Image (cartoon, coloured by chain):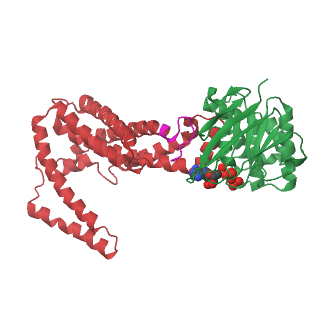
Amino acid sequence: MDAGVIPISNTQLALSVILVLITGVISAALRLELLKPLLWGTVRTYLQLTLIGYALTYIFNINNLILIIVIISLMCLVASRTAVRGSPRAGRYSMLLGFFSLWTSTFLVGTIVMVLIISPEPWYSARIAIPIFGMILGNSMNGIALSLERLFSEVKSKISEIEALLSFGASPWESVRDCVKEALRAGMTPTINSLMVVGLVSLPGMMTGQILAGADPQQASRPLPVVVMLMIAAAVAIGCLMLVLLYYKKLFTKEDAIAHYV
Amino acid sequence: MPEFFKFDQIEYHMGAAGRTVKVSSDLEEGSILVIKGPSGAGKTTLLRILARLLECDKGQVFLQGQNWLSFTPQLWRSKINYLAQKPAVFNGTVLDNLKKPFALKIKKDMFNLDEAIDGLRELSLNENLIHQDARTLSGGETARITLLRPILFKPNILLLDEPFASLDDNSARSVMEFLKRWLENETGRGIVMVTHNDIYKDISGIKIQELELSEPGVN
Ligand SMILES: Nc1ncnc2c1ncn2[C@@H]1O[C@H](COP(=O)(O)OP(=O)(O)OP(=O)(O)O)[C@@H](O)[C@H]1O
Ligand SMILES: [Mg+2]
């Protein structure tokens, strides 16, 4: 059963530069001007993954609850910066709301999974917690970014309907309810799509990892990847809901009129 | 007996140039106040301020002696109803559009279909229009349907921004008569309107307030 991890030597790693070259040639031929970001991205990928390798070894050995919480909170911070970039007021306040929603949804769902479903020994085992939380965060981040972007574009395109409702005495919530619904739908659609095609088009990241590491596909397909898929769906739903519900108020002035920057 | 509707020393500035407008006026119960002024003078801006959709720099508005700030924005807007220069049309039929405001929490009354149909007739619109997709209406039909919407909602004051802009003279006259009847049908009503049309000339008891287009720095 234990076929072990597929070994990749440094030479092989260096050969993967060929992949970058292919993309680079395409970019140069079509003048996409992606060469610089592509190279920078490649360097960052090598660097970040190498460093995280060392860091993870260290963190797994220490396996301290506080340290794990700090690490995951830092991950949330980076994710929230990326998630709220699309909003017209990407100020500190947006970041704060993004961070709060990501943090709460990730910790809520992640902790349930760790304590009740996987229950390793100890329940916060870094070796399991960090990859699990990472997966949740990556997906919630994308969901939140999509929701937020859709919320703003919907409100912009429906501004005259919203003002008409406001002028009949609608509350802010009544006036943007349809936009909020669309925003939530947009944030959750990728996750729901992936629930539909999982196994048919793509394998969950977790299962891919286990199979590459030599696990039997039948074992690898359940129950953990099922749990992971469902937990991701739950976290995305909670994260998007929290952010959109916290955020829509920011579209209004304290007089409950549409703010001028929308 | 306090004045019915009054705005006092309303002061606001517009655009990047920061031109400032100062205006005071009042309206008697059952009458019409016409706001006049050249394009860009700030007429739309004034109506939006009166509906509390925009904030002004200074000044106060009173409805039957009560300060506007003693109402919640929602309650105020349900009493002082602003109809935009380019009114919004919602997805759905004309009926859906007329019913829309009645779905709001602030509105306690039920939608009355007979009133809506009477309204259509009075505005010389065919009553079969009620099941037509609202987005397929002509410009003039849209103008009258979107005017009927706040009429059925029964606010105290209607703030109308160029209600005759897309109407021919005959329709404009029938709309004007319709508004006049609306004012007389019940107490506690008034209209503030912005218009370039002069059909109000034959009607008695109309007050006119000019908005001057002053240069920046003046005042
Ligand atoms: N949101 C805004 N941002 C910047 N400038 C604005 C804004 N709204 C209005 N203005 C400016 O304020 C001025 C007054 O606008 P307003 O719509 O009140 O004019 P108006 O008197 O209604 O003109 P018209 O008769 O053409 O409708 C205009 O110069 C306009 O460009
Ligand atoms: Mg105007």
Q: Residue at x 44, y 36 (%)?
A: A246
Residue A224 visible in the shown view: no
Residue A105 located left or right of residue B146: left
Residue pushed farthest top?
Answer: B1
Vertical comparison of A31 with B177: above or below: below
Q: Is residue A256 magenta?
A: yes
Q: Nearer the viewer, residue B105 or B199?
A: B199
Residue A51 location in percent, x, y? Answer: 14, 50
Q: Residue at x 79, y 35 (%)?
A: B190
Residue B147 location in percent, x, y? Answer: 76, 44
Q: Which residues are magenta?
A: A249-262
Q: Main secondary structure of the magenta part?
A: loop
Residue A110 location in percent, x, y? Answer: 28, 35
Q: Residue at x 50, y 45 (%)?
A: A182
Residue B155 located left or right of residue A211: right
- Res A107 → quadrant: top left
The red-tinted chain is: A
Q: Is residue A116 magenta?
A: no
- Res A233 → quadrant: top left
Q: Colour of chain B?
A: green
Q: Nearer the viewer, residue B30 or B105?
A: B30
- How many discs mark residues in the rendered view? 0
Residue A99 located left or right of residue A206: right
Residue B44 location in percent, x, y? Answer: 68, 48
Residue pushed farthest bottom?
Answer: A29
